[in-house]
Amino acid sequence: MADSNNHNSLSRFRIAPVFMFRWEESQQAHVLMYPEGIVKLNATAGEILTRCNGENTVDDIVLQLSELFCEQPEFIEPRVHQFLEVCHGKGWIQPQS
Protein backbone atom coordinates (compact mmCIF):
# COMPACT_ATOMS: atom_id res chain seq x y z
CA MET A 1 0.00 0.00 0.00
CA ALA A 2 1.09 3.54 -0.62
CA ASP A 3 3.09 5.27 2.06
CA SER A 4 3.54 8.97 2.40
CA ASN A 5 5.59 11.17 4.65
CA ASN A 6 2.87 11.29 7.28
CA HIS A 7 0.88 8.10 7.00
CA ASN A 8 0.46 4.63 5.57
CA SER A 9 -2.50 2.39 4.83
CA LEU A 10 -2.88 1.41 8.49
CA SER A 11 -2.82 4.95 9.86
CA ARG A 12 -5.87 6.29 11.63
CA PHE A 13 -6.79 9.96 11.75
CA ARG A 14 -9.27 12.11 13.58
CA ILE A 15 -10.33 15.71 13.18
CA ALA A 16 -7.99 18.02 15.10
CA PRO A 17 -9.62 19.36 18.28
CA VAL A 18 -9.50 23.01 17.16
CA PHE A 19 -11.87 22.19 14.27
CA MET A 20 -15.56 21.37 14.38
CA PHE A 21 -16.59 19.13 11.50
CA ARG A 22 -20.25 18.93 10.68
CA TRP A 23 -22.95 18.93 8.06
CA GLU A 24 -24.13 22.48 7.39
CA GLU A 25 -27.70 22.34 6.19
CA SER A 26 -27.72 25.93 4.89
CA GLN A 27 -24.73 25.19 2.63
CA GLN A 28 -25.74 21.60 1.85
CA ALA A 29 -22.16 20.57 2.55
CA HIS A 30 -19.81 19.35 5.23
CA VAL A 31 -17.80 22.15 6.76
CA LEU A 32 -14.81 22.53 9.01
CA MET A 33 -15.31 25.38 11.41
CA TYR A 34 -12.52 26.98 13.42
CA PRO A 35 -12.19 30.21 15.40
CA GLU A 36 -11.00 32.25 12.40
CA GLY A 37 -13.29 30.88 9.74
CA ILE A 38 -14.97 28.04 7.94
CA VAL A 39 -13.99 25.66 5.15
CA LYS A 40 -16.75 24.34 2.92
CA LEU A 41 -15.86 20.88 1.64
CA ASN A 42 -16.92 19.20 -1.56
CA ALA A 43 -18.83 15.94 -1.31
CA THR A 44 -15.81 13.67 -1.63
CA ALA A 45 -13.78 15.58 0.93
CA GLY A 46 -16.73 15.45 3.31
CA GLU A 47 -17.03 11.69 2.87
CA ILE A 48 -13.33 11.21 3.62
CA LEU A 49 -13.34 13.41 6.70
CA THR A 50 -16.53 11.78 7.96
CA ARG A 51 -14.51 8.59 8.16
CA CYS A 52 -11.58 10.21 9.99
CA ASN A 53 -13.00 9.18 13.34
CA GLY A 54 -9.90 7.62 14.85
CA GLU A 55 -11.26 4.13 14.22
CA ASN A 56 -11.03 3.70 10.44
CA THR A 57 -7.64 3.00 8.94
CA VAL A 58 -6.77 4.61 5.64
CA ASP A 59 -7.42 1.21 4.04
CA ASP A 60 -10.90 1.16 5.62
CA ILE A 61 -11.62 4.60 4.18
CA VAL A 62 -10.46 3.53 0.72
CA LEU A 63 -12.68 0.43 0.78
CA GLN A 64 -15.71 2.33 2.07
CA LEU A 65 -15.35 5.02 -0.60
CA SER A 66 -14.77 2.39 -3.25
CA GLU A 67 -18.13 0.87 -2.38
CA LEU A 68 -19.86 4.25 -2.03
CA PHE A 69 -18.66 5.58 -5.40
CA CYS A 70 -18.58 2.20 -7.22
CA GLU A 71 -14.90 2.64 -8.10
CA GLN A 72 -11.97 0.28 -7.86
CA PRO A 73 -9.88 0.72 -4.68
CA GLU A 74 -6.83 1.22 -6.91
CA PHE A 75 -8.51 4.33 -8.33
CA ILE A 76 -9.58 5.68 -4.93
CA GLU A 77 -6.46 4.94 -2.91
CA PRO A 78 -4.00 7.52 -4.29
CA ARG A 79 -6.64 10.24 -4.13
CA VAL A 80 -7.43 9.45 -0.49
CA HIS A 81 -3.75 9.45 0.41
CA GLN A 82 -3.23 12.75 -1.38
CA PHE A 83 -6.22 14.37 0.30
CA LEU A 84 -5.18 13.14 3.75
CA GLU A 85 -1.71 14.49 3.12
CA VAL A 86 -3.18 17.92 2.37
CA CYS A 87 -5.51 17.74 5.39
CA HIS A 88 -2.64 16.78 7.66
CA GLY A 89 -0.51 19.59 6.26
CA LYS A 90 -3.29 22.09 6.98
CA GLY A 91 -3.69 20.73 10.50
CA TRP A 92 -7.28 19.62 9.91
CA ILE A 93 -6.58 16.05 10.98
CA GLN A 94 -4.13 14.43 13.32
CA PRO A 95 -2.94 10.86 13.71
CA GLN A 96 -4.83 8.78 16.23
CA SER A 97 -2.41 7.28 18.71
Image: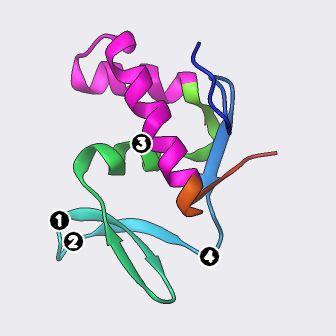
Q: Mark 4 is on which residue type?
A: Val
Marks 2 and 3, the one that precedes in the sequence: 2
Q: What is the distance, in whole Å, between disc 1 and disc 3 at their CAs?
A: 16 Å
Q: Mark 3 is on which residue type?
A: Ile
Tag 3–tag 4 contact (CB < 8 Å): no
The residue mark sitting in front, 1 or 4, is 4
Provide the secondary structure element on which disc 4 rests.
loop
Magenta-colored stretch includes residue 87: yes
Q: Residue lying furthest front in this view? A: 5
Image-based side of 52 in relation to 79, left or right: right
Please give the range of residues in magenta. Answer: 59-88
The residue singled out by tag 3 in the image is 48
Q: How many marks?
A: 4
Mark identifier at residue 25 = 2
* Residue nearest the observer in this picture, 37 or 46: 37
The residue singled out by tag 4 in the image is 18
The residue singled out by tag 1 in the image is 28
The secondary structure that dominates the magenta segment is helix
Which quadrant: the N terminus? top right
Q: What is the distance, in whole Å, between disc 2 and disc 4 at their CAs?
A: 21 Å
Q: What is the distance, in whole Å, between disc 2 and disc 3 at their CAs?
A: 18 Å
Which quadrant: the C terminus? top right
Tag 2–tag 1 contact (CB < 8 Å): yes
Marks 1 and 3, the one that precedes in the sequence: 1
Marks 1 and 4, the one that precedes in the sequence: 4
In the rendered image of this protein, does residue 72 appear above or below residue 68? Answer: above
Q: What is the distance, in whole Å, between disc 3 and disc 4 at their CAs?
A: 18 Å
Provide the secondary structure element on which disc 1 rests.
loop
